Amino acid sequence: MSAKAKKDCPREFDFALIVGNIHELTQDVEDSLFKAGCDDGTLSIQYGLLYIEFSRLASSLEEAMISAIHDVHSAGINAQVRRVDECNLVTAADIARRMGRSRQMVHQYITGKRGPGGFPAPECHLTEGYPLWPWYAVSHWLVQNNLIRPEESMNAEVVDAINDALDRLWETSDYSQRIKKITQELQPQQ
């Protein structure tokens, strides 16, 4: 089988969507989502938001997620997909779990005692003892050093891009104006 044919073969992708504007799981909501194509999702309400766990057949994770988002939006129930439920910020323990390696080994990669060095810097909580790294940057470094499959990094980028796009889709005009103003203020002074 050629690489292209293998890539185009549908496989099952598991992911969850967090959906706004639906606060109660009624029969109408369930029926509308089912008819819209979400028959491969398990619905629940979590913290006042609709939570849909999908097992979707597609040729890529991106295709699976985008088609699920379209199906939710087309259900005619004013549902707004807010995010793919995948946290981009990870602890060293999260990195170890995702790699299937020990926390000690990950700590050695982070400190440069093992591997080629150049591990990505944490993004926040640097002084609190449990710094957080952006998973897409860490996964890219891990792929470059043959520690995880390239697909893992591509999937991290897809999730991050979809969540960024969803943030932009639902941001208010006031927020957009604030971002524009702050961006101008942050420009280097000439």
Image (tube, rainbow, N blue to C red):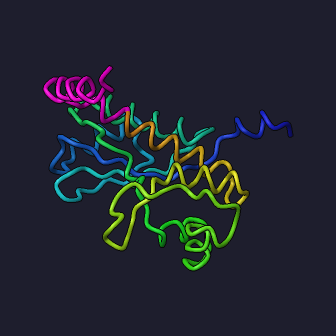
The range drawn in magenta is 165-190
109 w.r.t. 48: above or below: below
Q: Position of residue 101 (x, y in %)?
A: 62, 74
Check if residue 57 falls in the magenta segment: no
Check if residue 188 falls in the magenta segment: yes
The quadrant in which residue 28 appears is top left
Quadrant of image for the N terminus: top right
68 w.r.t. 93: above or below: above
For the point 60% across and 73% down, which residue is it? 108
Magenta region, main secondary structure: helix
Q: In this orientation, which residue lies closer to the viewer: 110 or 168?
A: 110
Q: In this orientation, which residue lies closer to the viewer: 29 or 19?
A: 19
Q: Position of residue 153 (x, y in %)?
A: 59, 48
- Is residue 82 found left or right of 135 in the rendered image? left
Q: In this orientation, which residue lies closer to the viewer: 2 or 86?
A: 86
Q: Position of residue 71 (x, y in %)?
A: 38, 33
The quadrant in which residue 69 appears is top left
127 w.r.t. 70: above or below: below
- Is residue 144 found left or right of 26 in the rendered image? right
Q: Position of residue 49 (x, y in %)?
A: 21, 51
For the point 20% across and 32% down, which residue is it? 78
Q: Residue furthest front?
A: 190
For the point 56% across and 67% down, which residue is it? 110
- Is residue 71 found left or right of 81 in the rendered image? right
For the point 42% across and 52% down, which residue is it? 88
Q: In this orientation, which residue lies closer to the viewer: 32 or 63?
A: 63
- Is residue 55 found left or right of 116 in the rendered image? left
